[in-house]
Image (spheres, coloured by chain):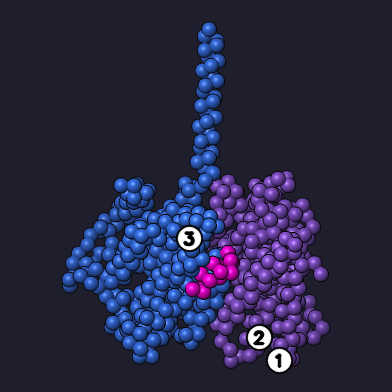
Amino acid sequence: MNPRLYPLAATIAIFLLAWVICVMQFPYMLSTRVVGNLLTDNAYLGIVAVGMTVVILSGGIDLSVGSVIAFSGVFIAVMLRDTGLHPILVFALLLVIATGFGAAMGWLIHALAMPPFIVTLAGMFLARGAAYMLTIDSVPIDHAFYDLLDDAYYLMPGKGRLTLIGLVMLLTVSVGMIVAHRTRFGASVFALGGGEATARLMGVKVGRTTVMIYAFSGLMAGLSGIVFSVYTSSGYPLATVGTELTAIAAVVIGGTLLTGGAGFVFGTLIGVLTMGLIQTYIVFDGSLSSWWTKIIIGLLLLAFILLQKGLLRVTMARVGA
Amino acid sequence: MTALRRVTPQLLTLAALVALVTLFFPDFLRIEVVNGRFVGTIMDILKRGAPIGLLAVGMTLVIATRGIDLSVGTTMAITGAVAAWSITQGYGLGGALVLALLAGVAAGLWNGMLVAIFGIQPIVATLILMTSGRGIAQLVTEGRILTFSHEGMAFFGSGDLLGIPSPALLWLLTAAGVALLMRRSALGMLIEAVGVNRAASALAGVNATVLLIAVYVASGLCAALAGIVATADIRGADANNSGLWLELDAILAVVIGGNSLMGGRFSIAASLLGALIIQTIDTGILLAGFPSEYNLVIKAGLVLVILVLQSPNLSHHWYALRRAARTRRETAMDRAKETGR
């Protein structure tokens, strides 16, 4: 097997193993209801993690996504409350804003030659602050169209519900896979992750690609915000604090190299589902406290990073020999 | 003299901020003596700025080695929880302090080993503790807010010595101690050497591995002190909220202090001024009657301005512009001479 596929294989193996352990203890976890809920509950995380995967593949990082999701929710809620615009129009407007916001950060990163970490940190403050300035309260969304979105689901065999937002997440992951692995833009992202100087020599337009990468991440964060607002039927400026770190963790557990240049969008989906599975297990168990989720995710993170280090050493040794 | 010149931009920013806040709130600079202790907004800023100030000291050292420590906020939660737990278990003040500091050292050792020995990027290595650490803190407090009543412990949060609030004293002394240690010995220079080029400094005989671990341990210790202050202040350990997002404020303080995220030269005094600037903004926005919602937006604007000023590209563009202007002027003059002839 291609050594590049080892991290992905390890991710899938761990996910399946975890599920087998869960099912052995709680046979009901094999049902489509659990699967449906797993997809619905983690829909917003899965979408934002697709954007994060592309950013990390390029060797960057985007800390602003959690705040952008919160801003999106608040923006939608306030617009629906104060104007008579149709939700679809509001969604379109929001996606334009979020994409523009990401593009602006990408441009700053390139133009100022500053680390993405600190530029997106400023973006994180800005988006969260903008959400606060719109409202500091939780604004409920009460709209017939939202009820429609909320109730849209496909009944799988076994009474499990594949909800609209779960489906949107799966579609987004598919689109992300095509963008990252099958387009010129995706090739540029991988090249950039391998090293900016070499990418430039290969003819990659570094500036344009950087802007597009962060615009893509902004778009995904906006879409994730829409899904999150459908999921919670409200907008709250304090929502999704720390989601950026959960998304980064999902990407790493999904087998993407944090230094950039290697990884798979599909792995990220498995990473998100693994984290969701841990949470579901803790809910099923009932006696374990929720803080174990954090500790176990931290340990998984460590295991994957060490695995990547080991693999890198093995491949380097092979190249050396 | 050079040290003063180094912190001039930060001093000017702080002075401008203070002037601005005083304009909105004339009582800002007044300090009164009530019951033998100094009372006033400035004292309040010095006291409330203690956690950021303490974290910024450790963070400066870490950033000087080209690293970053995302886990300090979580370490605050862990050490605060350990301190509160030991007090409620009856280990006394000394035991609680020692255990909390040991927890900080352990967190630093963990981070340092991941970075220096396993060679994991600092941002990722410290991310692990950042995500899992709050779980550990909740394990210690068993998910509750662990309260205690112990006057000796509360002194670190709300007591005062010679009229000065003890948290303010604690961070000023810590900063002075660390700064002296760095500049009166070769340690500071060695850290800068590792930050500029780890491989080269190792070849030059600097024990980069030990130095890197030591830097993260120092950061853990500073976080432990901050955790003790935060816990003593509210007389309880809140595993969920203690030190939440303070790592970002601490990094911001270091960046405002003009320290490069690329490692190398550092100034602890400048980072502390950065911490004071952040705390003055926080307090000033409240005092001036602005809604606190503006806080984050103003911070974001500030970061952007500093980024633009620090950008390596900007000076490059500036020189390029000047050179282009000079060439254009010279050709114009040459042409003028020719036509004149």
User: Is residue B111 visible in this depiction of the protein?
Assistant: yes
Q: Is residue B98 magenta?
A: no
Q: How crowded is the residue under tag 3: few (<14 C-alpha within 10 Å), some, or many (20+)? A: some
Q: Nearer the viewer, residue B173 or A90?
A: B173
State the extent of the magenta-drawn residues as a range. Answer: B109-121
- Where disc 3 sits, the SS reads loop
- Circle 2 — which element? helix
- Asked if one can make out residue B277 in the rendered structure from this viewpoint, the answer is no
Q: Is residue B112 magenta?
A: yes
The image quadrant that residue B150 belongs to is bottom left
Check the image and name the residue furthest to the top.
Answer: B341
Image position, residue A200 (x, y; %): 69, 46
Residues flagged by tags 1 and 2 on a common chain:
yes
At 42% from the left and 69% from the top, the residue drawn is: B218
Name the subunit of mark 3.
B
Residue A95's disc is none
Check disc 2 and give the amino acid type: Tyr
Kind of residue at disc 1:
Phe
The numbered mark, 1 or 2, whose residue comes first in the sequence reads 1
Q: Which residue is mark 1?
A: A26
> Hey, which quadrant is residue A313 in on the image?
bottom right
Disc number placed over residue B206 in the picture, else none: 3
Among the chains, which one is purple? A
Spatial CA distance of label 2 from label 3 is 49 Å
The residue beneath circle 2 is A281
Q: Residue A157 placed where, x, y %?
A: 82, 83
Q: Nearer the viewer, residue A81 or A170?
A: A170
* Residue shown at the point (40%, 70%) measured from the top left: B222
Q: Would you place residue B40 above or below residue A278 in this image?
A: above
Q: Chain of mark 1?
A: A
Position in image of residue B338 (x %, y %): 55, 11
- Side of B257 relative to A256 (left or right): left
